[in-house]
Amino acid sequence: MGRCEHQVVGEDQPSRSKIVLVGFMGTGKSTVAGQLAGRLGYGWTDTDSEVVAAEGCSIAELFARHGEPYFRQAETRALTRLLTADTPLVIATGGGTVLSEANRELMLRHGFVAALRASEAVIVERVAGDTARPLLAGDPAAKVRELMKARSGAYDFAQLSVDTDGLDPGAVAESVLSGYLGTSGLYRVSE
Ligand code: S3P
């Protein structure tokens, strides 16, 4: 092996201290992120809040003023910042973050990725009357149906998938936690 062929441990190795929650809108990512962070003593945030803080306006305003592609770029910048931060973090991502292959690779490289799933009926119930999500404006039920169809398979790259229907956020957090601890080696008793 030549001098430049060695593997740089720490650069290509997945970080043990980031948990990334992906999933469709209304699957409870932010609520579960808070629960998980409390259990682990980690901080938590979501990419939407980071985008709002960085851009100084709401997600709806960003879509209206600059369009979705602009929002997606801001989202990727926020995701990159969070994943490369020096502190342990639980990161709830916006439902469309997974649409970029580069984002998916980043998440897998830097964190443990868990997908939260929910049925169409549950999601529609949760997002009904919501005005903060521009992609659901007009007829939320029809938009949810259309987007879920268009995004089928988009969350399959995650290392763990949790069906959240009928589970409270604490139970979902416990499922993610056991997946994370099982793969991270953080609390492995013997090798
Ligand atoms: C989006 C999901 C939203 C937000 C934006 C776009 C999407 O986040 O990022 O409205 O494309 O699915 P939540 O999944 O937290 O609702």
Image (cartoon, rainbow, N blue to C red):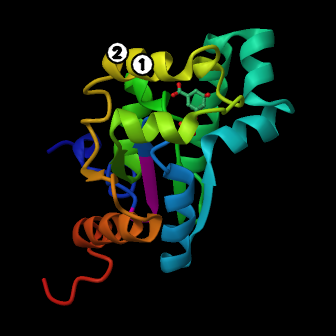
Q: Quadrant of the N terminus?
A: top left
Local crowd size for mark 1, using a 10 Å CA cut-off: few (<14), some (14–19), many (≥20): some
Label 1, on which residue? 147
Q: Residue 185: x, y in percent? A: 26, 74
- Residue 97 part of the magenta segment: no
Q: Check disc 1 and give the amino acid type.
A: Leu
Q: Quadrant of ligand 1?
A: top right
Q: Quadrant of the C terminus?
A: bottom left
| Quadrant hosting residue 138 | top right
- Residue 145 visible somewhere in the drawing: yes
Q: Residue furthest bottom?
A: 189
Main SS, magenta region, reads strand
**Picture disc at residue 150:** 2
Q: Residue 128: x, y in percent? A: 58, 33
Q: What whole-number distance in Å separates the C-alpha atoms at marks 2 and 1?
A: 5 Å
* Residue at image point 30% right, 67% down: 175
> Is 129 in front, or is 99?
129
SS for dot 1: helix
- Residue 17 part of the magenta segment: yes
Q: Residue furthest right?
A: 56
What residue span does the magenta drawing correspond to?
A: 16-21
Question: As displayed, is residue 171 above or below residue 47?
Answer: below
Q: Check disc 2 and give the amino acid type.
A: Ala
Task: Mark 2 and mark 1 in contact? Answer it, CB < 8 Å.
Answer: yes
SS for dot 2: helix
> Is 84 in front, or is 79?
79
Question: As displayed, is residue 33 above or below residue 177?
Answer: above
* Residue at image point 38% right, 36% down: 121
Q: Residue 77: x, y in percent? A: 63, 32
* Residue at image point 71% right, 35% down: 51
- Residue 25 visible somewhere in the drawing: no
Q: Within 8 Å of ligand 1, the CB of disc 1?
A: yes
